[in-house]
Each structure stands twice: as C-alpha cells, then as structure tokens.
C-alpha cells in the first residue's frame, strides 16, 4: 500500500483514517497538533503517543521535511534566503523577511514554472512539478524552527504559479490558517498570480479572504504579451473583470504588481494608460524595480524614471508604493539563489 502524505491531510480526513486504524477519536487531535501546531518533523517526536501507535503511523503514513541545503543572511536588512532539498532531490527556494509588522515568509508553490514570463528566473527550465501542501507548509514550519521566530505573514511569490497548482495551494491555505495548526490569519497571506482568469474566478468563490496580487507589468495587452505569454490567453479586460469579482466577493483590495523594465513598460505614456486602466479599481500598485536575471537581456528602469512613474500615478489618484528591495546582497530576488545553485555558480 502506498503511504499517505499525512501532513497534507485535513483534520477531518486524518480523523477518518485513524478511526479506520482502530484508534480512539482523541488521537486525531493529538497527531494533528503534533504535525501542525508543534510542527513535529518525525513520528518519533510525538512523545505522548504510545510506541505502538507511532509505529503504526510510520507504516501507514509518509512524513517528509525539506532539508536545508543553504542559508544566506543579509547584512543589510537581516533577510534570510533558504535553499531546501525535497525528498525527491528537487531544490526549492524560500525567503524570510523581517518587518515592523512581523516576520514574513515568501514561499514557492511549484518546482520551476511553466508560465514563461520573460524577466523571471524561475521559469527558465520550465515546470518540474507541483509542490504538495505538505511541502509548502514545510517551508514555513522549517523556517520558523530555524529562525525560532513566529511567522505572521506569508507571500506566495516564490517559484511557481499558484493557480497552476490550484488544489494544492487552496489546501495549503486552509491548513496554514487552521486554528488547530499555526493559525496564521488569511488576511496576512498574499497569493500572487500572473492572471489565469478561471483560477481567479474560482478563487473568488473559495471563501478565503487572502490578499490577491495580480502581476500586471503592463498597461495594455501588446506590452503585456511581450513580457508574459499568459497575456495571449487572457486579455487585460477579462483579467481585471475577474479581479473586480474577487474584490466584490471577498472585500479584499487587490495589489497590482508592476515590474519596471527599462524602455519596455516605464514611460509616462504607459503610466497614464495604467492610471486610466485602474481608475475605479479597488487596489494599489506596487512598483518593482526589475531584478536583472543573468540569462535575460533587460535592465532596471533608472531611479528618475521610477520616481516619475510613481509621481504620475499619485497625481492621477492611484495608490502606489515602490517595493523596498530586501536581501540585495544575498541574491534576494526571484529565484536567483536556486538558479545559481542549479548552474553551479
Ligand atoms: N506566478 C506568480 C508569482 C511570481 S513571483 C505571479 O506571476 O504573480 C512574484 C512577482 O515577482 C510576480 O509579480 C513576478 O512577475 C515578479 N517577478 C519575477 N521575476 C522578477 C524579476 N526578475 N524582477 C522583478 N519582479 C519579478
């Protein structure tokens, strides 16, 4: 019999299986608490369970944790970057960031990505596979254990497209926000998508009040298609309509990510178009000075262009911020640590 991935199970599912195994009903609460509240990493740690039960769990279930390959700490801002090896040998990247409002972890949802955005390092080798809910939880649990500090915020902005792993991501969100587990507030979680319209629509009906971030990166379909292949499948009109639906259903204001690429999407005409596009939309724009990726041929906009773009939007009444760069000295951005590891740099 194939072993069941125990950490990806909902409490109700674990309850049923343990009952089938002939265990008393209170055992499910104990095991689930060990897994998700105390974030135990093997059955041997579950010391208040009878040895026989621990053996039975070992036989029936699989419990794997990401193994630390490398940790880098920024001298500038304390940001930590982690490379983890999964049970099948794949390597993923996660980031820990300290803010005044708490500690935030940026996690990956897939090994690699197949969306093909032209400025992104995660997509260079395409998609390897989806991460399981347990592997997404594992990034948070492991990092909390390593830093010994409570994680209060999560951003799904590492490698992968969350809505290309829809079921896995939703399960992860329910488990990480479960009262019986780490109980991280859904309001402190951001899911970032490149704009898969059916995914946004479905997510709007999921009843999970997370912040949705849309990778916009352009004010019109032509420029967007140059940067993001997904834009050929879903025009901006449809994407923004789905975003409005998300706001209407959840009451959550959106974040629009806009990476500024020199000479591609950063002139004032584009700022004007963007202001027009987002007029009346409930959300704010987060400008990201693009992080140059070695394998790609494009540059970050100049400071002056960034400032003027921002000021233009502000004058047009659009809420806008420029993303503060974290961990600049440790390959902090966008899949570059993993990339360096894979290519031996
Ligand atoms: N697949 C999701 C998550 C991607 S990473 C999405 O597309 O939203 C989170 C954000 O970083 C996205 O907006 C993505 O477009 C952006 N990004 C990726 N590579 C980048 C780079 N080199 N410089 C700046 N932003 C980048």
Image: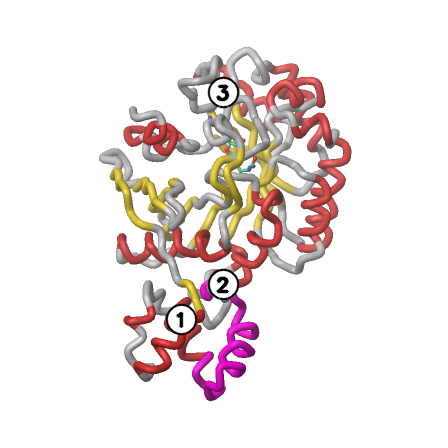
Percent x, y of residue 40: 33, 66
Which residue ends up furthest to the left in the rendered image?
75
What residue is pinned by disc 3? 306
Query: What percent of the width, then of the height, locates residue 201?
Result: 72, 47
> Which contiguous range is marked in magenta?
6-28
Magenta stretch: includes residue 15: yes
In the displayed structure, 274 sits above or below 40; it is above
Looking at this view, is 232 or 13 the one in front? Answer: 13
Quick check: 262 above or below 71?
Answer: above
SS class, disc 3: helix
Tell which tag, 3 or 2, sits nearer the viewer: 2
Tell me the distance, in whole angstroms, between the alpha carbons under discs 1 and 3. Answer: 57 Å
Q: Between label 1 and label 3, give the one nearer the viewer.
A: 1
Q: Residues within 10 Å of mark 2 (few under 14, many from 20)?
A: few
Percent of width and height locating residue 145: 29, 58
Secondary-structure class at tag 1? helix
Q: Main secondary structure of the magenta part?
A: helix
Q: Nearer the viewer, residue 6 or 168?
A: 6
**Residue positioned most to the top:** 263
Sequence-earlier tag: 3 or 2: 2
* 184 in relation to 85, above or below: below
- Give the spatial CA distance, label 3 vs label 2: 54 Å
Q: Which circle's residue, 1 or 2, is located before the other in the chain?
A: 2
Q: Which quadrant of the rendered structure holds the C terminus?
A: top left
Q: Identify the residue at image location x=32%, y=34%.
A: 327
Disc 1 Cβ-to-ligand 1 distance below 8 Å: no
Q: Does 167 sit left or right of 18 as displayed?
A: right
Which mark, by number, is residue 59? 1
3D distance between C-alphas at marks 1 and 2: 10 Å
**Residue 190 magenta-drawn?**
no
In terms of image quadrants, where is residue 316? top right
């Amino acid at each position: 019999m194939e072993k069941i991935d125990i950490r990806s199970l909902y409490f109700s599912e674990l309850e049923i299986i343990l009952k089938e195994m002939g265990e008393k009903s209170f055992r499910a609460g104990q095991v689930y608490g060990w897994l998700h509240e105390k974030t135990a990493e093997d059955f041997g740690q579950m010391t208040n369970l009878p040895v026989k039960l621990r053996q039975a769990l070992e036989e029936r279930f699989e419990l794997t944790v990401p193994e630390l390959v490398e940790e880098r700490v920024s001298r500038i801002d304390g940001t930590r970057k982690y490379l983890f090896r999964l049970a099948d040998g794949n390597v993923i990247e996660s980031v820990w960031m300290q803010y005044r409002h708490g500690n935030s972890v940026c996690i990956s949802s897939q090994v690699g990505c197949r969306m093909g955005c032209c400025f992104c390092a995660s997509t260079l080798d395409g998609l390897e596979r989806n991460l399981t809910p347990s592997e997404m939880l594992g990034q948070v649990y492991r990092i909390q254990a390593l830093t010994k500090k409570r994680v209060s915020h999560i951003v799904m902005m590492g490698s992968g497209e969350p809505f290309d792993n829809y079921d896995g991501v939703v399960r992860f969100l329910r488990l990480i926000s479960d009262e019986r587990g780490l109980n991280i507030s859904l309001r402190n979680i951001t899911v970032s998508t490149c704009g898969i319209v059916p995914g946004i629509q479905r997510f709007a009906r999921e009843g999970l009040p997370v912040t949705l971030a849309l990778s916009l990166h352009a004010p019109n379909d032509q420029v967007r298609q140059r940067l993001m292949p997904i834009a050929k499948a879903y025009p901006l009109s449809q994407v923004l309509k789905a975003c409005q639906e998300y706001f209407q259903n959840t009451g959550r204001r959106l974040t629009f990510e806009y990476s500024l690429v020199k000479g591609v999407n950063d002139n004032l005409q584009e700022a004007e178009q963007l202001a027009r596009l987002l007029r009346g939309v409930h959300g704010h724009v987060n400008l990201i000075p693009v992080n140059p990726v070695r394998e790609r041929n494009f540059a970050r906009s100049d400071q002056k262009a960034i400032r003027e773009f921002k000021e233009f939007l502000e004058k047009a009444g659009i809420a806008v911020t420029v993303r503060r760069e974290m961990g600049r000295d440790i390959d902090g951005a966008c899949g570059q640590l993993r990339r360096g590891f894979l290519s031996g740099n």
